[in-house]
Image (spheres, helix red, strand yellow):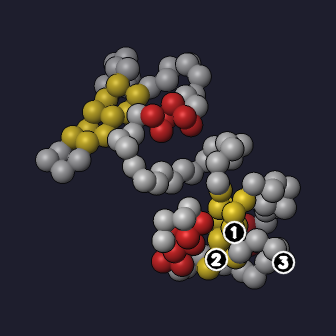
Amino acid sequence: RFRRAGAQEVMVASPFRYAIVHELRGASEPSLAEQVARLAPADLVLVEGFKQAAIPRIEVYRPALGKPPLHAEDGGFLAIVSDAALDTDLPCLPLNDPAAVADFIVRALGRG
């Protein structure tokens, strides 16, 4: 309702968390750097999307979806997370093992 009424921002709040939704209303999408600058300081920020950003990346690839893998055309990936065995020199991590993915990220960033 508030968005339809023209609100630029809407806040949803509870005693446990809050979220602010900001309407761009035709403005350009903020860059990744601008988005991250809005966050509180953190040791690690996980990002989904921003496929062209020059950041360390891990591809989640499911061959059954029938789409070509991004890592085959772009050398900027650290690893692949998949539900299938892949022919690649990159580390392949099991899709259904989030602890293995987390361990890889910690090691890759020199935090472990």
Earlier-in-chain disc, 3 versus 2:
3
Disc 3: CA contacts within 10 A as few (<14), some (14-19) or many (>=20): few
Say which element carries label 2.
Answer: strand
Residue at (39%, 39%) from the top-left corner? 39
Residue on which the image places disc 1: 80
Residue placed most toward the observer, 3 or 22: 22
Q: Whole-Å distance between the Cαs marked 2 and 1?
A: 6 Å
User: Could you tell me residue 101's position as x and y percent?
Assistant: 55, 73
Residue at (48%, 71%) from the top-left corner? 112
Earlier-in-chain disc, 3 versus 1:
1
Work out whether 35 lies above or below 15.
above
- Give the numbered dot on residue 67: none
Give the amino acid type for the residue marked by disc 1 in the picture: Ile
User: Could you tell me residue 86's position as x and y percent?
Assistant: 79, 78
Give the amino acid type for the residue marked by disc 3 in the picture: Asp
Residue placed most toward the observer, 108 or 64: 108
Residue on which the image places disc 2: 93
Say which element carries label 1.
Answer: strand
Say which element carries label 3.
Answer: loop
Q: Whole-Å distance between the Cαs marked 3 and 2?
A: 13 Å
Question: Quick check: can you spot residue 64?
Answer: yes
Work out whether 10 lies above or below 78.
above
Residue on which the image places disc 3: 87
Residue 45 is left or right of residue 52, and the answer is left
